[in-house]
């Protein structure tokens, strides 16, 4: 039983990454109608950014937490302005293909310059060590990841669902022409949204840098799992993607304990089941 | 009579000339087939190409009138691409020797091609021990290490050193299973006991739940039967969960120095691993490694596979030098290589078994604490030396069909 | 809904396109038949032909059905594994091995198709991708695939007990014949009533439904056909490479076939073939540029999507107002 608690908690940590990433995907999809295949690569860039801020700029983890999402977010806005923007009005699939190409380029370039085995990134001093919870030894950093990402998710939800900016954003998703008629700069808003979604990916990257080896392909396989998470949750609601992210992390954690061989496939199996029962996903609206 | 002698000369001359032309064929082409773009780009990759070039220079053949050309190719870790590049190299580009070949699948595929085209293959990076067992050929030499070396070295030496109970974290596919099986056998043969194992899927990013299970087992040693990023991540996260500080030992069954470098000592300290090459073993390895590092664009010390490429190519060229010419007959060259004892800066003295297994000592290392290390690349301290005759599968146990003649 | 490709409505004259296509087909066949005497390396062409058949099968779905499958490699790889295993372990004849491989891919196509066609557009792509990753993990862990080692040294044998496939020239013509047969089958399907309905679904699915077509049936059928033909390509690949490995089921391979088709021209008859030859040449002859392969592929993706969405063949056809 104790082991079970431990696994649940560990699952929650993984769920934090799923939630942050699928949240970013959902925001981007909602606004740009693009499935951002480059999300995994941008997550990787976030982690690399943290590494460079530390090794070149001497800026600590805490700075990275703020700066990396901004840097990568700006890079995202640049991508949107120069490339993604041109796909407006075309089929969704071109967006997928373009971002897939961008992901390949980013991963390839990073691989060339930084090798395959990756770069080290230590846990910040303040968060090293751990506490004994009785049923497990919990590294403080892991607890921090859960709490921090939960806070970020809730904040994002609040901005989108409860603020004026969020209201514009949702309105522009529904009917861009009408919103433009009110004098709101929709293209700029789209760019900002892409930046925001990408920034969330970068944030997840910074959070994972002390846990996982910082390496060029760190996001390549993760993105496919996150796709499955998104399909399960449906991309209709912000809250939906957050909850699905955390839940799937926990389910995956349980599988690692009960039947570890299947822990990488359980998310995909769940996806098939959900599709058979409710094709629009758990929280999704009909397409 | 005179006329008769002239006629004899007239017959013999072309023969002599052609024999001479044959004897004077001093062209060699070496293809480094490696992974330039992915998982093994650090431990092999461009460093392997450099190692091959250094071997060519050190052989001194160019001064003796030989033309040695080194080309390289990226197999992208795809066996079909690897095999088709190898086939084209042998057929069209007239490559004599293919060397390196990380990734077991690609190595096995290329080994078949080398046999079919009667070329020479020296495998340095791939670990699969089938190359000198069921799937051995008369055209392949397996140079640097194999799963047996890793499993047996770490399993035996660590159990002898007091690690009596083992728990395995194994990647759930053929390679992980083989590594775990061989290590478990070595552990049990030495009087140790395997008290549990967990199989994790390949490319897992979060190992915490597996590590928790390993931690709860209270085993003396946690054996990591995985590779690449999986190994790096499990080591990094083991440090986070305080596993080595809790008194358990972590044994990396397949780990290269580049990965330790990337992890940094903070995360990797206390880890035990087996290798057949380390740059700081003796004067000879140091001198080779310094030269390598100076010329390596990445600034890395040579890894075990890269050192193997150097050693293998050097021995190949020595064999050709001794023969005086390149016969372009792969099987014959490999046979000659097996006759000639090996000796080079990276691995010292050694020899090649009839099944194509290159034999040299292996070493059990422990990764230093940050306080013990004098600087970058000063990472290992020697725990034990496994003598050459014990480091590899005994020839009597090899299932290589070549031996059954 | 926006139209996926601009190649679809290029020509309005009903008879001209068929003539263009048949003429091109004859030229292509003549060129391919002449390969062994041209000095071109036959193994390279065989590899490219397998890729081309795979891409044509894929193109049937995206180019004519508007369905972007991002997990098509599993069909290639499944047939590869089954054929290789059947030939090596069960020692069946080559023709039976091919049949078993294609059957396995077709069966997998039925299952995958049933799940995937429940969603449209972008979801369809993500679902196929996720399913392919699921299948990849199964193969990775299944003992018969030998994990990273792959199934090696598959015997080529004698087709119908008298055609010796170990002879490269013979093998070449067998691969060519299979490719042409597969290509012809796809070509016929596209120009059949079935193909017309498929195109109508791509252009406007609700309208097709309102016309009384059970669009799901058509989509499923297209999916299964495409999976089976991808399997045929995978089975042939086993004879060429003499091995079957994980790379053929990994998602990067799925990405590659998208790239091939996009580069050649989505929804063009010959685009996938042209794309396959270009990408295969890149992999073989740019091998020494190894580290840049990923970047080059990514760049091609970006350039294609941004500047010439019709692909090479599509642009040529558009320029000359032909149908290719």
Image (spheres, grey):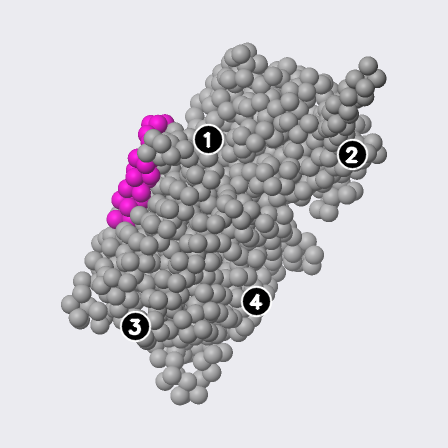
Dots 4 and 2: beta carbons under 8 Å? no
First along the sequence among labels 1 and 3: 3
Q: CA distance from mark 3 to mark 2?
A: 66 Å
Residue linked to disc 4: A75
Q: CA distance from mark 4 to mark 2?
A: 53 Å
Which element is circle 2 on? Answer: loop
Compared across the picture, whether B10 is left or right of A153 comes to: right
Which tag is nearer the camera, tag 4 or tag 2? Answer: 2
Residue linked to disc 1: C153
Which residues, given as a range, are shown in magenta?
C89-110
Dots 3 and 2: beta carbons under 8 Å? no
Which tag is nearer the camera, tag 1 or tag 4? Answer: 1
Residue found at the very far left of the displayed protein: C212
Residue linked to disc 3: C14
Disc 1 and disc 3 on one polypeptide chain: yes
Find out whether residue C99 is within the magenta segment: yes
Residue B235: x, y in percent? 56, 37
């Amino acid at each position: 039983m104790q082991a079970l608690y431990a696994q649940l908690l560990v699952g929650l940590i993984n769920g934090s990454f799923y939630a942050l990433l699928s949240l970013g995907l959902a925001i981007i999809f909602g606004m740009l109608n693009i499935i951002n295949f480059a999300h995994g690569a941008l997550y990787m860039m976030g982690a690399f950014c943290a590494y460079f801020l530390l090794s070149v700029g001497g800026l600590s983890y805490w700075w990275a937490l703020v700066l990396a999402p901004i840097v990568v977010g700006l890079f995202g806005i640049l991508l949107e302005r120069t490339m993604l923007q041109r796909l407006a009005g075309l089929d969704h699939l071109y967006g997928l293909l373009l971002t897939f190409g961008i992901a390949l380029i980013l991963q390839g370039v990073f691989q060339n310059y930084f090798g395959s085995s990756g770069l080290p990134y230590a846990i910040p001093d303040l968060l090293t060590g751990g506490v004994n919870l009785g049923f497990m030894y919990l590294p403080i950093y892991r607890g921090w990841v859960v709490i921090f990402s939960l806070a970020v998710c809730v904040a994002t939800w609040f901005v989108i669902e409860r603020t004026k900016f969020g209201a514009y954003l949702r309105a522009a998703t529904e009917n861009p022409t009408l919103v433009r008629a009110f004098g709101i700069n929709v293209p700029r808003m789209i760019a900002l949204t892409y930046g925001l979604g990408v920034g969330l990916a970068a944030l997840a990257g910074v959070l994972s840098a002390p846990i996982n080896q910082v390496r060029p392909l760190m996001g390549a396989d993760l993105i496919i799992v996150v796709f499955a998470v998104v399909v399960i949750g449906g991309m209709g609601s912000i809250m939906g993607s957050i909850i699905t992210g955390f839940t799937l992390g926990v389910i995956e954690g349980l599988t690692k304990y009960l039947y570890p061989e299947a822990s990488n496939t359980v998310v995909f199996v769940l996806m098939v089941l959900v599709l058979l029962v409710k094709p629009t996903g758990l929280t999704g609206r009909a397409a | 009579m005179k006329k008769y002698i002239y006629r004899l000369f007239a017959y013999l001359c072309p023969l002599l000339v052609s024999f001479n032309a044959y004897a004077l064929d001093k062209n060699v082409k070496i293809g480094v087939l490696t992974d330039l773009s992915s998982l093994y780009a650090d431990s092999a990759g461009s460093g392997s190409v450099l190692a091959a070039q250094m071997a060519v220079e050190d052989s001194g053949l160019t001064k003796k009138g030989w033309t040695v050309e080194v080309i390289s190719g990226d197999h992208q870790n795809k066996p079909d691409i690897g095999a088709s590049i190898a086939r084209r190299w042998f057929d069209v580009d007239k490559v004599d020797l293919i060397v390196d070949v990380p990734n077991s699948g690609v190595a096995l595929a290329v080994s078949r091609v080398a046999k079919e085209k009667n070329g020479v293959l020296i495998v340095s990076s791939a670990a699969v021990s089938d190359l000198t067992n069921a799937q051995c050929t008369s055209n392949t030499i397996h140079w640097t290490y194999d799963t047996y070396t890793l499993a047996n070295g770490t399993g035996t030496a660590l159990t002898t050193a007091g690690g009596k109970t083992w728990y395995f974290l194994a990647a759930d596919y053929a390679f992980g299973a083989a590594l775990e099986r061989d290590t478990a056998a070595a552990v049990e043969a030495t009087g140790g006991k395997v008290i549990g194992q967990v199989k994790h899927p390949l490319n897992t990013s979060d190992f915490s739940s597996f590590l928790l299970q390993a931690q709860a087992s209270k085993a003396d040693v946690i054996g990591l039967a995985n590779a690449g990023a999986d190994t790096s991540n499990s080591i990094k996260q083991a440090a986070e969960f305080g596993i080595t500080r809790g008194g358990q030992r972590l044994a990396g069954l397949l780990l290269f120095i580049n990965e330790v470098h990337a992890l940094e000592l903070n995360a990797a300290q206390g880890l035990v691993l087996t290798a057949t090459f380390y740059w700081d073993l003796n004067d000879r390895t140091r001198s080779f490694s310094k030269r390598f590092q100076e010329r390596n664009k990445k600034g890395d010390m040579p890894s075990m596979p890269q050192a193997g490429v150097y050693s293998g190519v050097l021995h190949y060229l020595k064999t050709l030098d001794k023969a005086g010419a390149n016969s372009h007959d792969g099987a014959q060259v490999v046979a000659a290589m097996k006759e000639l004892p090996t000796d080079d800066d990276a691995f010292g003295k050694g020899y090649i078994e009839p099944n194509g297994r290159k034999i040299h000592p292996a070493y059990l290392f422990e990764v230093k604490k940050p306080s013990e290390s004098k600087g970058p690349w000063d990472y290992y301290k020697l725990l034990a030396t496994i003598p050459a005759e014990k480091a590899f599968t005994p020839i009597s146990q090899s299932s290589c069909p070549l031996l059954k003649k | 809904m926006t139209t996926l490709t601009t190649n679809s409505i290029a020509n309005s004259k009903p008879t001209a396109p068929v003539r263009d296509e048949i003429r091109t087909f004859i030229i292509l066949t003549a060129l391919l038949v002449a390969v062994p005497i041209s000095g071109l390396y036959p193994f390279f062409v065989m590899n490219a032909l397998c890729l081309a058949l795979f891409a044509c099968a894929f193109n049937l779905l995206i180019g004519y059905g508007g369905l972007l499958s991002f997990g098509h490699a599993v069909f290639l790889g499944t047939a590869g594994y089954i054929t290789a295993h059947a030939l090596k372990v069960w020692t069946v004849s080559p023709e039976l091995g091919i049949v078993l491989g294609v059957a396995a891919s077709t069966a997998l196509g039925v299952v995958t198709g049933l799940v995937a066609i429940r969603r449209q557009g972008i979801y369809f792509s993500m679902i196929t991708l996720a399913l392919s990753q699921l299948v990849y993990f199964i193969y990775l862990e299944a003992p018969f695939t030998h994990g990273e080692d792959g199934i090696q040294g598959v015997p080529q044998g004698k087709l119908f007990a008298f055609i010796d496939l170990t002879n490269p020239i013979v093998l070449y013509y067998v691969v060519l014949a299979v490719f042409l047969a597969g290509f012809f089958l796809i070509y016929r399907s596209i120009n059949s009533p079935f193909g017309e309905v498929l195109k109508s679904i791509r252009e406007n699915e609700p309208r097709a439904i309102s016309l009384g077509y059970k669009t799901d049936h058509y989509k499923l059928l297209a999916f299964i056909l495409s999976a089976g033909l991808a399997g045929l390509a995978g089975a042939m690949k086993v004879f060429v490479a003499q091995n079957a490995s994980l790379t053929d089921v990994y998602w990067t391979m799925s990405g590659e076939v998208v790239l091939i088709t996009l580069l050649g021209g989505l929804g063009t008859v010959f685009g996938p073939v042209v794309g396959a030859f270009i990408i295969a040449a890149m992999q073989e002859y740019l091998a020494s540029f190894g580290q840049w392969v990923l970047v080059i592929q990514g760049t091609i993706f970006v350039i294609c999507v941004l500047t010439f969405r019709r692909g090479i063949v599509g642009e040529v056809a558009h320029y000359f107002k032909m149908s290719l």
